[in-house]
Image: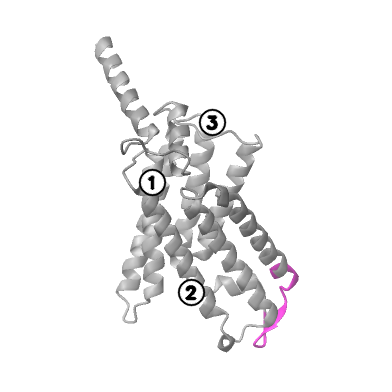
Amino acid sequence: MSRYLSYYYLLFFALITGAFASMAQNAYGMTILGIAAICFGLLFALQWLHTWNQKDRNGLALTELTCLVLLSVFLALRVFNIHFQSVEILFTGTALLLAMVYGIRLFRIIQPDKRLAGRMTWLVLCYYLSLIFFLLAVSLAPLIPGAVSPSGILAFILLFLFVTGSWISRNQIQEGEKISGFQVVGRFKDRSALLLSLFVLFALYTGLTRIGWLPKMYTSVYPQTYYQLLNEAESGKDIPVNGKYRHEAFKEEYDRFSEKHLKNKE
């Protein structure tokens, strides 16, 4: 993963730039976000190919990267307002599968034969559980909207405990070596740190927009009502009528209106 760190930094910068551009009511901000999501998917796909070509294929790593590629694609589709039937179910299933991957990884790491010190075991436990609860919050949003906030809050508490405990125990002796919790998780050969960073950024943005400290992202493609209806469908608040969600019906009507308006102008 270390060979891709510079690319990850560039994509993080692109995400932040796109978000601020969108909040400043520049339509190209969403385009930057969509391109960044596609680039994340391509990086994960390259890592998947590298893992697949190894002699000893790691099935858990392949599953993790497959889920990340799919989640990147779903995010890009959302940014570019491309929606298809059952996308929420596919997104939920992918996020839950990824949570299971990290749960299995956690179970393997905290085994007694790994020789983690007692305090370090608790730090690793908080680290991975935080990521798992973040994934649960994301995956349950379309099905059980009420579970999102408790799961997200619990994830933040666990992450806070990990960061605080790692700082306090930064000089802990582990097999004759002074090491902190940050160094331990930094040696894990997965994308957990990257995902946690993305979740924290997203959670901070969501929280700051709710209290009015940051403006919401702007897009000029469709009226704001369309995105409100889309959010209701993705959060499970909207029920399809005759196999069609309200945001889909709204989009069709709006497209017909726009097309008719353009013809009249011609």
Under circle 2, the secondary element is: helix
The residue at 51%/35% (across/down) is 217
Q: Nearer the viewer, mark 3 or mark 1?
A: 1
- Taking 199 as reference, is 30 above or below it? above
For marks 2 and 1, the one nearer the N-term is: 1
How far across and down, in percent of the image, does residue 8 sit?
Answer: 47, 57
Q: CA distance from mark 3 to mark 1?
A: 21 Å
As shown in the figure, which amino acid type bears the numbered disc 1?
Ala
Picture residue at 49% right of the left edge, 46% below the top: 15
Q: Which residue is mark 1?
A: 76
Q: Amino acid at mark 2?
A: Ile
Tell me the residue that label 2 is attached to.
104
Decide if residue 85 is on the left or right side of residue 60: left
Q: Which residues are magenta?
A: 166-178
Q: Position of residue 18 (x, y in %)?
A: 48, 40
**With 40 as the anchor, is 184 left or right in this view?**
right
* Residue 168: in magenta span: yes
